[in-house]
Amino acid sequence: MNPIEEAVSALKAQGIHSILTQFCDLHGVAKGKLVPVDNLREWVEQGAGFAGPSIWGTGLPRYGARSEYYGRVQVESLRALPFMPGVAHAVCDGFAGGEPLDTCSRQLLKHQLQRLEARSWRLWVGIEPEYFLLKRNAQGQWDVADTEDRLAKPSYDLKAIHRNAAYLDDMRSTLTALGFELQQIDHEDARGQYEVNYKFDHALAAADRYMLFKLTAHAVAERHGMTFSCMPKPLAHAPGSGLHFHLSITDANGVPVFTDAQGALGLSQLGHQFAAGLLHHADAVSGLCAPTVNSYKRLASSASASGTTWSPVWKAYGDNNRTCVVRTVAGRLEWRLPDPSCNVYAAIAATLAAGLDGIERALNPPAPCDEDLYERRAQGLPMPERLPRDLKEAVDALEANTYLVAALGSAFCAEFIQLKRAEWDAYSLQVSAWELEHYADAF
């Protein structure tokens, strides 16, 4: 019995009749369809077919051999979905015309990882999802789902955890059934905000797992009458949600290449060079790691109602310094720029491309930051250069960054830039409640 036949047999023994063939569009939103498990060979070798132009960012035409998007099932990803009885989840790679699709973000990440394979290196990523639980109130407006969640400083609030124990236990049991090795669940620093931590993995598996996490979180929240929200900053006067990447690379012998116990900040020269690449390309990478209009409401140095903000506004790095966009900890790098609205494959690919450029060109980072940058700003002292202030500035930086566009692929970047410019233009045409309140009768 070959591997595909073995997989079909094993799935049917679990009562599986259908496969949810899942990929993501340019925005990082999960898409897919249900197909019969009996035809697994077709889904692996040819792929489940989709109308290409119906998917954001494929760039595929409305007719011809390359108008169809095919999601090819990765057999090793198959697993039963606890919240969809009889259905197994499968991660798919994007193909068109029998070739890997250059606008598929999973293919994009795989291409970047080949640069590491040439060095016999492997990238490990620990992803830290933060998110909000929301619902619409009686007036149809979005609010936090737990209306009793109103502490001024709600981090680690156990009363909120007690009130939401049924939801949190459902998340725990469902994620555990899907193979997540959970490390902690806590209430974060904003009303209605939570963080779930689970074990790190190699980069591609980590990105696949985050997509499965989101799929699960949406389903579990809906089961409890709530909405799982990846909006970076839904509350104006509270901290927003990040999607921090903990990054490390190992060599062919499994030895961490960023770590040097005797080096500055516990990093090797390669670790410092990778950090330098991140800082050098931070403006352009912002477009992919913080890809929405709302992302830049999070990436702002405004005060928080809780009195605390961890927003990584400035291009700096430092030892266990959460006010920097790069935090060094335990011989690894924490990249604090991404937020949960990103396409995780594209965000990791851009992060890796930026870091590798730092290594390949032996870039030197600025001096490490050993102070609270928010306190430094309050004292009126000179500050490091800050990240882009809005989506337009970030997209402009990406378009101008010839290295990153070439590394990620001009086709993907062209689609991304076009869609994000349209998003910015649509936002710019809106008249907000703030504008009406300040200007309606002011003149």
Image (tube, rainbow, N blue to C red):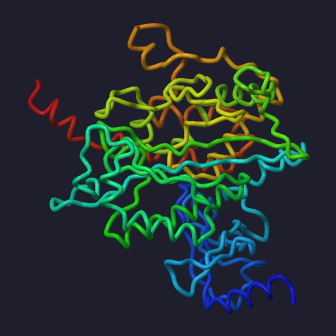
Quarter placement of the C terminus: top left
- Residue 54 coordinates in the image, percent (x, y): 54, 68
Total marks in image = 0
| Most foreground residue, 267 or 230 | 267
- Residue in view at x 69 percent, y 41 percent: 247
- Residue in view at x 50 percent, y 13 percent: 383
The correct choice, above or below, for 329 with respect to 176 in the image is above
- Residue in view at x 41 percent, y 30 percent: 300
Q: Quadrant of residue 33?
A: bottom right
- Residue 53 coordinates in the image, percent (x, y): 57, 66
- Residue 287 coordinates in the image, percent (x, y): 55, 39
| Most foreground residue, 180 or 423 | 180
The correct choice, above or below, for 317 with respect to 15 in the image is above
The correct choice, above or below, for 108 with respect to 40 in the image is above
Say whether residue 168 is left or right of residue 413. Answer: left
Q: Quadrant of residue 79?
A: bottom right
Say whether residue 393 is left or right of residue 397. Answer: left
| Most foreground residue, 383 or 332 | 332
Quarter placement of the N terminus: bottom right
- Residue in view at x 61 percent, y 67 percent: 23
- Residue 173 coordinates in the image, percent (x, y): 51, 70
Residue furthest out toward the left: 441
Say whether residue 175 is left or right of residue 93. Answer: left
